[in-house]
Image: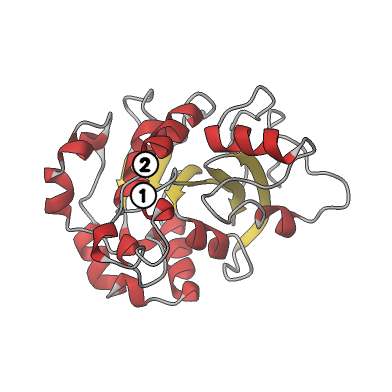
Amino acid sequence: AAHPSPTMPRRSKGSSPGNRGRKGERGSGSSSSSSRSPGSARRREENGAGSRAPRIALRSGSKKWITCIRHGQSQAQTAIRGERRTSRYLDAPVTGKGLQQAKNLSDRVEKPELVVVSTLTRALQTACLVFKKFKDLKIIATPIVCELGKIPENTPRSIEELKKDYNLQMLPGFDRIDFSNVSAEMKMIGESRSRSSEQACLQFCNWLEKRPERVITLVGHSTFIRKFTGSVAPRIMWIFCVHVHPCVCVCVCV
């Protein structure tokens, strides 16, 4: 059986993997578990920094290692009450704070064999900034891991629109993202926002099984990751929560 790298924090005695994997996924994406005062914990989580934060390091074993990273804070998450469901937040990007969160996390990641990212703007921005130092890293975009829920911020733009977006063009590594299978995958899954969580998670499990890589990072969204690492995904055998914002969890996939 595969085991976590020695560089990763140990799970406290008596806590179950399933419970740890479901912590720290509410609000703007910050984790809630800390032995220090709420104020100091909140500041460390919001900034994605802290001297005691674990380094995210994975080692291949007999299983696939999947690291799940939630996007940085998005503009929709800071919307005035009642405005979040307006067209103003269609495929909302990250805020300045969200950009900094992703940059801070880039110092703690090691190179995976593959990064798979949602086609939503906030996830694309996060992926480019978190892995900016790895110039030859393979990054694949897929609508399979887009966020669940019928709200404007979860409505993907066309690939043509994304590639014409100046702010995305200026991101390190955006030109290397592989969008080649997006159209075919959209046809396969139909209207992505109408999928059930069960369908979405099983589609991603099937996608993973077809990949030859063993150490993979997903850059995606809170609800999708929570469902994927929970009871909905029957092929997940182990979950480990890493308390570094915006990183959500690490899991081993059979």
Amino acid bearing label 2: Thr
Q: Between disc 1 and disc 2, whose residue precedes?
A: 1
Q: Work out which quarter of the rendered image holds the C terminus and state it.
A: bottom right
Residue 98: image location, x then y, percent: 42, 39
The crowding category of the residue bearing disc 2, from other C-alpha atoms within 10 Å (few below 14, some 14 to 19, many at least 20), is some
Question: Contact (CB < 8 A) between labels 1 and 2?
Answer: yes
Residue 170 percent coordinates (x, y): 20, 31
> In the figure, residue 164 lies in which quadrant?
top left
155 relative to 14 in the view: left or right: left
> Can you tell which mark lies on residue 168?
none
The amino acid pointed to by label 1 is Gln
Identify the secondary structure beneath mark 1. loop
Q: Which residue sits at x=15%, y=43%?
A: 165
The residue carrying mark 2 is 95
Q: Is residue 68 above or below residue 49?
A: below
For label 1, count other residues whose C-alpha is less than 10 Å away and answer few (under 14), some (14-19) or many (20+). many
Question: On screen, 168 above or below 172?
Answer: below
Along the line of sight, the residue nearer the viewer: 66 or 127:
127
Q: Secondary structure at mark 2?
A: loop
Q: Is residue 9 above or below residue 14?
A: above
Q: Position of residue 71 (x, y in %)?
A: 44, 46
Q: Is residue 202 left or right of residue 177?
A: right
Which residue lies at the image location 32% right of the left edge and 55% below the top edge?
142
Disc 1 to disc 2, C-alpha distance: 5 Å
Q: Residue at x 17, y 58 (%)?
A: 158
x%, y% of residue 204? Answer: 44, 62
Q: Which of the 4 image quarters holds residue 2?
A: top right
What residue is disc 1 on?
75
Residue drawn where x is 48% and y is 73% of the image: 197
